[in-house]
Image: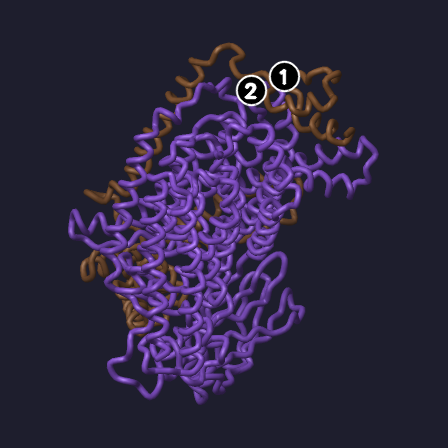
Amino acid sequence: MYNDFPNRSDNCRRSPSATNVVPVPLLVQWLHSSCIFLLLAACAGALLLIAVPATAQEPVTDDDVNDVARDLYCPVCENTPLDACPTQACQDWRDEIRAQLSQGRSEHEIQQYFVDRYGVEVLAQPPFEGFNMLIWLLPILVVVLAAFLFWRYLGRLREGAPPTADEPKKDDTAMVAQGSAQQPPPAADEDDYVSRIEKEVRE
Amino acid sequence: MIANLGFAAILIAFAAVIYAAVASLYGAKRGDPRWVESARNAMASTLPLILLACMLIVYLLLTNDFSVEYVWRVTSTEMPAYLKVTALWGGQAGSLLFWNLLLAGFTTAAMLRKWDDQRALMPYAILVGSITQIFFLGLVAFVENPFTPSAVIPPEGQGLNPLLRHPGMIIHPPMLYLGFTGFTIPYTFAMAALIKGRLDDGWIRTTRRWTLVAWLFLSLGLILGGRWAYDVLGWGGYWAWDPVENASFMPWLAGTAFLHSVMIQEKRNMFKVWNIVLVVLTYLLVVYGTFIVRSGVISSVHSFAQSAVGPLFFGFLGIMIVFSVYWLLRRHDQLATANHLQSFLSREAAFLLNNFVFMGVLFATFWGTNYPIISELFTGEKLTVGPPFYNKVNGPLFAALLLLMGVAPLTMWYRSSARRIGMALRWPALAALLLSVALFALGVDSWGALFGFWIVTFSLILTILEFSKGVRARMKRGESPWAAFSNLIGRDRRRYGGYWIHLGVLVMAFGIIGSYFFQQETQIRLQSGESAALGDFEMFFNGVRQFPGPDDLLIKEADLSVFDNGRPVGRVTPRTEFYTRTGQPMTIPGVRSTVGEDFYVIMVNWESATADAATFRIFLNPLINWVWAGGFIFILGTLIAAWPDPVDKKVTAATRARRPAAQPA
C-alpha cells in the first residue's frame, strides 16, 4: 500500500520523550512540546509569508519533490504514482515540480498546474465536487441503506421466531444416542464445544 | 506441423466439450444415464487434449520455433529453459490456454470424484461446467490462438517481460489461476442443484473442500503477488489497490464471505438463497477479474495484454448473470427456510454481520475499480482512483472485520447471553488497552495506529483463548499439553484451522498497520564515500559496479554498508537491471530485513562511472515481515482446514446410511 500520510517522516516511532515512563508528566510534557512545536510552526509560517523571495534560494530536496509527486499520477503510467515511476516522462514531471517548488509554489498550486494541463486524472483521487462526489457518497449511501435493510430483515426473521422453535439439540442427537444421554444437558449458555470435547474424550 | 497438431487438439477439445454440454442436457431430459456417462467421458477427454496442446506449445517455446507468433513474442534464444516453460503463461494466448488446462483439470477431477456421490446432479453439473469451458476454449481456438503462425519469422524473439522473470511472478499467476478456476466448481454444483431442484445442502457438502482449495490458492496468489511487488516493483510497498490486484481480491472477498455464511446453512438450514448468491457472485467476479486482466479495460501496470477479448468477456458475463439469476428466481420459493433467527446475539447473526462487512468492502472495491469507466462514460472525464480512496473507505471496514474476528467465536448458535460475552471480553479488552497505552507512552502518536493495535491485540488474545480453552478441557482428561493441542485441532480441523487462519490474519494486520502508519522514507544523492541516515540506520555508499547479467541484461549494482545505531550490520546492494533488447529497466531493491523492520534501498539514478554519484530512495518499513509471517500462518491454517482426511469417507458413508432419502437412486 502506498502511504498517503503527508507527514509520515514526522511519525517517528520514538519521540524525544520516549525515555519518560510516568504517563501523567509525559502527557503534560507532550502537550508542552507540541505547543512549542505549534508555536515554532506558526513562526516559521509567518516568516515564510513575509520572506517568500528568501525561501526561493533554499535548495529543494528530493524529499520535498517526492512529497508532492506522491499524490500525482502521470496519464501514461497509469496507477504508478509519480514518486515511484522510473520512466523519463515522470522524471521530467519531477523536475517540473522541483522547478516550481524552488519558485516558492505550494503543493496545491503545483497540483493545480498539472490538473490544468492534463486533467483531474493526475490526482490520486478525484476532487470532492460535482459528479465525482458520487465516488465517496455512493459507498456511504449503499452501506447505510444496506445496514438499514439488513437490520429490518434480521428483525423480521426474529419476529417470526416461536419461543423455542428449532432449538432442541437436533445436531446432538447422534451423540446423545451414543451413550452420553445420562449427562445432564448443558445449560443453554454452556460452552457447547468444551462439553463436546469432554464427551469426545470420554468415548 | 507441431503448431497444427496443437491447434487441432484445441479444436477437438472444443468440439468434445460442446458435445458434453448437449449430451448431458439430452441425457437429463431423457433420463438416460448412458448419455450422461458419455457426456462425462467427453468432458474428461478435454483434459488430455488441452494438456497435449500445452505440452506442444511448451515444446515450441523450448525449441525457439519463431514460426509461431506467440513463441517469439514471449521468448528469446538466450532465455534459460525454465523461463521458456513459464512463458506458457507469460502472454495473453498462453495464459488463456493455461487457464483452460486448470479449468479442465478441476472440472474433470470433480466429475470423476463425485460421480457416485452426486449422480443426480451430474448431468447439470456437466452442463454448467462445460458452458464455462466452451467459452474459454472458444477464446483460445478462435480469438487468441497461441498457435497462430508468424506473418514474418523474426531471427530473434522479444523475450519474456522482465517483470515476469522473477520467481514470485512465475508462481503467482498459476496460483491465482488455480484459485480462479477452482471457484468454478462450487458454482457448477450450486447451479446444478438449482436446476435439478435438489436444494438440500448436498452441493455444499460436495464442494466444501474444493471451495477451500480454491480459496487456498487464491490467498496464496494474493500473498505471493504482494511479495513480488515488494521485491520487484521497487516502490517500497506490497499492495497498491491497482485494478488488477483488486480483480483478484474481489472474488476472494466474496469467497471468504461464502466460507463463513455456509456454516449457517449447515448448522441452521437458513440463508440458502444467500449462499447460492455468494457462490454465483464469486464465480462472476472470477470471470470479471479475468476480463479486467485480459481485456485491459482498466489499463494498469499489470495489464500486459490488450486485445479484442473484451467484448466477448462482457457478453459471456452478461449471459452468465442472466442464467444464474433466472434459476435463482425460479427456485426461490423452494429455498425458503422455516427456521428463524432466535437472537441478534448469536453465532448466525455474527456470521451475517461478517458477510455484511465483507460485502461492504467488496462493494467499495468494485466501485473504486470501476469508477474511472463510469466517470468516463458519464462525464467524459478520465480520472484516477488511487490508494487514498480505498484506504479511507476500506480501512474502517477492515477494522470492523478484525474486531468481529475476535468477538464472533464467543457467540453461540441460537442465542448467547450478553453478560457472559461481556465477561469474556472484559479482560482481553483491558489487556489490549494497556498495550495501546504503553505504545502511546513510548511515543506512538497516531490514533489510527493505536486503535488498530488495540483491535488486533484484543482479537489476538481472544483467538488464543479459544485455543487454550479447548486445550485445557482436553488436558483435564489427562492429555499432555501437546497431545491436547494437536488432538484439538485434529478433531475439528475446520474450526481450529479457521481460528489458525484468524491468527495469521491478525499477525498480518500487525504488519500492515505498522508499515502503513510508520513507514519513513527519504531520497538523497550520494557521492561515493558519503553517507545517509534514516531512523536508527546509516548507510555508506561504496560505489557502483556495472556488469552484464544473463540474457541481454546489463546490471548496475550499488554497494552500501549499513549501520544500525552505529553497529555494522552488513551491506545492501540495490540494483537496476536493464534489458538491452527491449530497453526495459527494472529496479531491484536492496533490503536489510529484521523482525522489527526492513531497511529498504532503491537506486533511483546512477550518474555514471566518472561522476561516481547516485541517488537513492530509502524506506524504513516497520513490522513489514509480520505481513509475510502472517501470510505463512494463514496458509498453514488453510492447509489444516482443507487437508483431505481418511475419516471423510467414513463420515459420508455414515450420512448416507442415516439419510438414504437424500441420495440419488
Figure label count: 2
Residue visible at 46% across and 53% down in the picture: B108
Q: Indicate how the structure is coloured in the image.
A: by chain
Q: Quadrant of the C terminus of chain A?
A: top right
Chain shown in purple: B
Residue A18 position (above or below residue B257): below
Looking at the picture, tell me which residue is in the foreground, A151 or B293.
Answer: B293
Q: Quadrant of the N terminus of chain A?
A: bottom left
Dot 1 falls on which chain?
A: A
Q: CA distance from mark 2 to mark 1?
A: 8 Å
Residue B244 position (above or below residue B31): below
Q: Disc 1 marks which residue?
A: A188
Looking at the picture, tell me which residue is in the foreground, B300 or B198.
Answer: B198
Q: Amino acid at mark 2?
A: Arg
Chain shown in brown: A
Dot 2 falls on which chain?
A: B
Residue visible at 50% across and 64% down in the picture: B171
**B252 left or right of B73 in image:** right
Q: Position of residue A28 (x, y in %)?
A: 57, 39
**B227 left or right of A84 in image:** right
Q: Position of residue A142 (x, y in %)?
A: 31, 34
In the structure shown, which secondary structural element does the residue marked by tag 2 occupy? loop
Badge 1 local density, few (<14 within 10 Å), some, or many (20+)?
A: few
Residue B75 appears in which quarter of the rendering? bottom left
Looking at the picture, tell me which residue is in the foreground, A179 or B583.
Answer: A179
Q: Are marks 2 and 1 in contact (CB under 8 Å)?
A: yes
Q: Amino acid at mark 1?
A: Ala
For residue B415, which numbered disc appears in the image? Answer: 2
